[in-house]
Image (cartoon, helix red, strand yellow):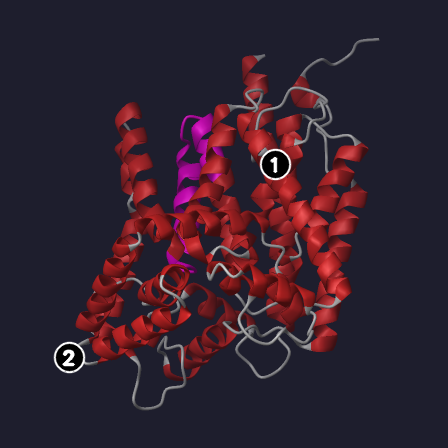
Amino acid sequence: MTVDSNPARQKQPRIPGWVWAGLVLLHLLALGWQACHNTYLFPDSDRYVQAARNLREAGVLYALPLQQPLELQEYSIRPPGYPVFLLLTGGAGANFPWLTLLLQNLLSLLNLGLALRWLVRLRGGLRPRQWLLVLVLAATGPGQFIYANLLMSEMLLQTAVVVLWLSLTACFTRNWPLRWWWAAVGATAVGLLNKPVFLPLVVVVLALGIIASWRQRRPALVLVGAVPLLVAGLWMARNEARTGYFHFSSIAEINLLRYNVRGVLQATEGPAAAEKFVRGTLSAAARRPTFATQQQYVQRAGASALQRHPVAYAAQHLRGMLTFFLDPGRFDVVHFLDLDPTPGPGLLQLANQRSPGAVLSYLSRLPLGLLAGLAGLLLANVVRLGLLIRFGLNNRYPAAARLVLLGLVLYVALLTGPLGAARFVVPVLPLLLAAAGAGAGLKAQGPAVPLPEPALAATQTAGRG
């Protein structure tokens, strides 16, 4: 009997049906809970919803009700991506946003499926106990299922990140096919129009296009790579037309002053001094004649405060990055499950104030069941981080696969900085899940190459034959 030894014709390993069933069940449980409890609005949801309503009713992106006097920062505090998504899917209406949440759950399943497909091709197949580990790690990342069922932009951004990850991996491993480069560039533009954190990535993408174009003598690569820069410039020009200030988002100054500077001053000069500085800076900025001079004043004052405490800021930034990976997400869980939040400052704010006694007091007031659940999530996050590091150090995997995945994860962690929390890790959760599966210390079942599209693998293998 003749055995077909051509790998292109052999059955490709697949994600087991019971793993898919588990993921679908988790999403259905979260959506069912949401349908019964109506907790789909988080503290930051109102501006997205209001911006979508203003687009529908007045044709203008403005994140508060259109009443005088208008606050110029509200024209640019939210990029247009998610408000447009809400507008198109009915999420800005008064009724339960079934279509919006259903689409977000489907996007979540798509993102997890693409990540696990990458893992299967990288490792050449997984054993049942490996799949069980992956499913457990997915289940202990509750942000995936929580944010799929909220009116928040994280799931749309996650889709852009997953497409960018797989497309860049294809570019690095397949000599920069133009269609994959277009996919990477398009995902960057979509991410940019959903979260300002993607703005610096525009420069990275352009640099990659320039390097690839120079090495391969293909000018089209640099021209395509400039598309996100063009998108950013057009949006900044729109904001200048509305506010008189050429900028991408007013959230940058808000985060600088009310989170970064406040956190550093709380740790170094005390909470009272931090509040006095923030209020004084806002008051002084308000006396400037234009929005541009107001924002520039906040930038200068915030930068000056951080320069006074560079070591404290560096420590806060590193602590925020560690929190990014380890935070079990108390805030998300409490709000989604409609539990009574502990009054007063949050746990992360108390940690920034370096008040161990206050932190312990805060934890002692949490319900025992919630505390045990958060401890379990924290343990899972520690395991996930350890496996991510192990994946990054495993030379058995192609360097390009490790470089792209780790680069995107670290980029988001670095840009999030002192704001690090469970919410901000959601856009890269599928990447962390894939890396954790690859970093598990169990032998893969066969040789593998990270390919986003099986047909390409078959074509390449057949060509070599």
On screen, residue 233 versus residue 130, left or right, reads left
For the question of whether residue 454 can be seen, the reply is: yes
Instruction: Please tell me which residue is depicted at 55% across the width and 47% down the height of the picture.
Output: 325
**Among the 4 quarters of the image, the one containing residue 244:** bottom left
Image quadrant containing the N terminus: top right
Which secondary structure type mostly characterizes the magenta part of the structure? helix
Image quadrant containing the C terminus: top right
Q: Residue type at mark 2?
A: Pro
Helix or strand or loop: what does disc 2 sit on? loop
Instruction: Please tell me which residue is depicted at 80% across the width and 9% down the height of the picture.
Output: 2
Q: Is residue 70 above or below residue 307?
A: below
x and y, in percent, of residue 377 in the image: 68, 52
Q: Residue type at mark 1?
A: Gly
Instruction: Please tell me which residue is depicted at 49% across the width and 24% down the height of the picture.
Output: 399
Residue 325 is labelled as none
Q: Is residue 205 magenta?
A: no
Q: CA distance from mark 1 to mark 2?
A: 51 Å
Helix or strand or loop: what does disc 1 sit on? helix
x and y, in percent, of residue 278 in the image: 32, 72
Residue found at the very far front of the displayed protein: 357
Where does label 2 land, which residue?
Answer: 289
Residue found at the very far left of the displayed protein: 289
Where does label 1 land, which residue?
Answer: 386
